[in-house]
Every structure is written in C-alpha cells, then in structure tokens.
Amino acid sequence: MEFSTKSGELAALRVDCIAVGLHAQGELTAAARALDVACGGELRAAVKSGEATGQRGSTVMLRALKGIASARVLLVGLGKRGEATDRAFGEAVRAAVRATGALRTLAIDCNDWAPQGRDARWRAAQLVISAREAAVRTDELKSRRDPEPRLPAQVAIVVGARADESPAARGIAHGRAIANGADFARRLGNLPGNVCTPTFLAAEARALGRAFGITTQILLPRQIEALRMGSFLSVARGSDEPARLIVLKYDGGRRGAAPIALVGKGITFDSGGVSIKPAAAMDEMKYDMCGAAAVLGTLRAAAELKLRVNVVGVIPACENLPSGRANKPGDIVTSMSGQTIEVLNTDAEGRLILCDALTYVGRFKPAAVIDIATLTGACVTALGNVNSGLFANDDELAQQLAAAGRRHGDPAWRLPLDDDYQEQLKSNFADMANIGSPANAGAITAACFLSRYAKDYRWAHLDIAGTAWRTGAAKGATGRPVPLLTEFLAERAG
Ligand code: BES
Ligand code: MN
Ligand code: ZN
C-alpha cells in the first residue's frame, strides 16, 4: 500500500473506488452528499432500500454510477454522528481497505470520520497507521507463507476540492514512519528465542544503524564486565548465549544538545531462571525483548522523519535461563551503581538488567531517560492490555508521554511511586531486595526498584507487559509503544 494526497471534486476523481462515510440511520456525510448529487441520488437510494445502514464497520459497494468518473463508490459505516472515536476511525479505515483489496487504486474522503479536534494531519497519519495494521503478517518462518492480505496498491487521501494538501502529506509521512517503526518492532517481537538471541538483536541494531545513519556500538561480555555491570551479568551468566549491551546514537538535533535516552529491556527469552515459570504460555516470554524492539523501532521512525532531536538507545540483551551458573534465590550481586541487590526471585530479572543500563546512560547527561520494559505480570492485572503502565519522577515528563500516547491509540496510564512502597524492597543482607511482598502493588515496587537507579535525571518508565503483544488466536506483537515514543520525540523536536 502506497499513500498519497489528492484534491479536487470527488465526482471527477478517476480511481478504481472512492470511499466515503455514512453515519448511522443512513445519514450521508458531506462527501457522500456531494457524490449523491453528482449521480442523481443513487447513494440515497441505497440507504432507502435498506442496503446501506451506516452501521459501524459495515461497507456497501455501488458500481457504475452516472456522473461519477470512478467505477465504484464504497459507503463506509461510521456509526452515530457525534459519537466518533479515534478507534472507530481506525476501524472504518480498515473496513475500507479490506473491502477494496481486489482493486488497485482507492481514494478515501475521511474528512467527516474523526472526532472533534482531530485535524487533517492527524487524519492522514492515523489513516496510514490503521490501514497498515491490515497488512501485518506473522508468517516469516512458515515454509508456506499465509495468503497475502489483499489490499489496494495505492491509497489516496482526499483533502477536499481546494484544500491545502501539505498537512495531509506531512501526516502521511508521519504515519508511515510510525507504521514502519512498529512493523520493525513487531517482527523482532514475533521471532522466537532461538532466532532472536542477544547476538541477533545486536546484528539487527547494526543493520538498522547502517541503513539509517544511526551510530551503533555493541559491547561484548568482557566490556560489560569492565563496566562492572554485576547485576546485568548475573542474569546473563545463566545462559550459554552471550550477552550484548547495544548502544545506538541518532544525532538529529543540535550538536551537543542533551539527548533523550531510551532504555529497552532485551530479555530474548525469560524462563524465570531458577525461580522457573510454569509451562503454560511460557512461549510468550519470547516477547520479553519488546522494550528493546520498541527502542529500535522508535529510532527507525525518528531517523526516517529526520527529527531534530538527539536520541540515545541503550539495550541490555540476554536470556534468563536456569543453569549451574544462574542466579540462585538469595544471591547478592553488586550493580554498576555500587548498590547491592539480594536476588530473592530470579524471575524478577528485568529490573536486574535495567538498573545497570540506567546507571550507564547517566554518562550521556540526558535531558530525560525513558525505559521501556515488559516488566511485571502485576501491570497486566492492573491495566490489562489497554494502557501501558507509566511511572515518572517528573510530572511534566509523565504528562507529555501520556499525551503523546493518546494521539495515535497507544495510551499509557500513570501509577504512583510513593516512598511508602519503597519499604517493600528492604533487605536484611543487601541494599535492597529485587522483589516486594507477594501480591502487593508488583508493578509499582518494580518501578520503585528502578527509581533508585534513576536519581540523577528526569526519568520515566513504561511497563508494557500488557500492551506489547496479544495472546490467544490473534497472538502477535503489537508494535507498542512505538507510536507513543515517536509522538513524544516528534513533539520535542518541534
Ligand atoms: N517478563 C516478566 C513479566 C511478565 C510476565 C510480562 C507475564 C508479561 C506476562 C518478568 O520478568 C517477570 O517474570 N516478572 C515477575 C516479577 C515477580 C517475580 C516479582 C512477575 O511479574 O511475575
Ligand atoms: Mn521474569
Ligand atoms: Zn522478564
């Protein structure tokens, strides 16, 4: 699918199909009314006959209408007027591209489809993001690929007869970069642990860097050791797959301007280690590197958009497996910060690798640090698969991230970090334990643990355990929170 803008009278456009909206009870949108007038009432007739209802998600195809240059008109159901939502907008777009999959060229007039306050740029960006979701595939490793999703090759966004096309054009570029970044993250997320190893992740980061002018540096175990990342390495030691610390630099901003640092959890498989997980659904722990994938996908989007901002990505990558060298409950490790940690549960490994990465990013004197991690099952219990968990030591940063997430269907909800929760991390033998009390604010105590390593800068933490992938029949990575992070960076870049 390629996207472009078009202006001009709808009836005179020459494409394989024009899609226009229809509200509930067959109420025509302005675009539909214009076509209806041009063809002498055929759209209204389709409503009168009961064929076209305007029900959300429904589509009706009309053919060979007199007075309309295009061969087809698709009526896309939008539901009740005045009840438009971002989500319904996306559903309508997907219904339109799916209904025209056999065709080559589609023009969509979605000027009346979005909620109040969503402008032409937003509509174009969201249209691209939503349409591209219909093209997502998960068959890379099947010997016989799934049938290709049938989608139109060219999708034009109609901006109105004499409207300026440039906001929509900018929206298309923005949406395309987000979709490409999310695709990149989804692919890595869906690859299994035996393919997507720390070494593989590092090679992918390298290749991304070469393709997009992002500097990459891959640190090997002995270099990680030289940095004294004793906590990260204690997790990595349980596996035969060697760890990697992946460092990426995108320099789109002013020379010397403080960067935004993105830190992604890169556990390429989480068995739990000696505190081993139950077998059911353990396969989904291949997704425990989705924070890392989001960092890479976001850097891709930032570079594609040439955002005027400096970004550093840091990814600690390793496996969490049980073995003769693995962490044992009660082991005490020394983090790069010098703080010691009693590993009471080896399955709370994400914070053990992230704490050293958080200490490491301090050297870049970042304007803000955001870590992204599939960190806790407790976050899924709290927020389900709608909102990512958001934590921050800075109100403005939290507010900016939450707003960025709401723009393209990638919301995050802030949870508290009161000092009172910190007490759960007290250890008799080390500076802190790596878990709090069982069944007691687990997402928050995990964030509290991280906060102890993020004292020197503005910091936020996104717990994406519930939002990075879907389970069940539609199992697959979502690409979240690439949209949130890209919006945040784009906003900062101005
Ligand atoms: N990667 C998991 C978190 C997770 C679990 C995400 C299930 C999505 C679904 C993380 O490493 C983990 O195992 N966390 C433990 C922490 C606990 C031992 C304090 C958890 O959430 O159970
Ligand atoms: Mn774990
Ligand atoms: Zn994990």
Image (cartoon, helix red, strand yellow):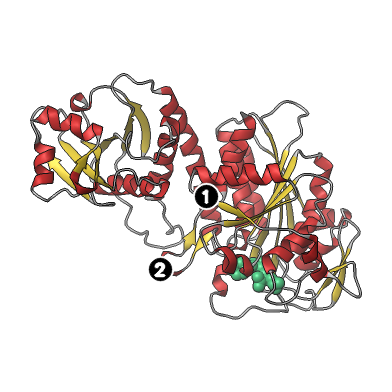
Q: Is residue 342 above or below residue 407?
A: below
Q: Quadrant of the C terminus?
A: top right
Quickly name the residue at label 1: 410
Q: Is residue 218 left or right of residue 23?
A: right
* Foreground disc of the pair 2, 1: 1
N-terminal label among 2 and 1 = 1
Give SS at disc 1. loop
x and y percentages locating residue 104 in the rendered image = 25, 38
Q: Is residue 119 above or below residue 231?
A: above
* Image coordinates for residue 9, horizontal then vertical, percent: 23, 23
Instruction: Say which residue appears at 77% left-offset and 53% top-offset.
Output: 357
The quarter of the image holding the N terminus is top left
Q: Which residue is mark 2?
A: 473
Instruction: Give the left or right position of residue 102, taking residue 115 as reference.
Output: left
The front one of 38 and 395 is 395
- Count of numbered circles in the view: 2
Q: Position of residue 203 (x, y in %)?
A: 64, 50
Q: Is residue 321 visible?
A: no
**Residue 376, picture quadrant:** bottom right
Image-quadrant location for residue 300? top right
Mark 2 touching mark 1, by CB under 8 A?
no
| Corner quadrant of residue 330 | bottom right
Q: Quadrant of ligand 1?
A: bottom right
User: Which residue is at a point 74% across and 77% down the rendered structure image?
Assistant: 323
Say which residue appears at 87% left-offset and 56% top-offset.
Answer: 336
- Can see residue 166? yes
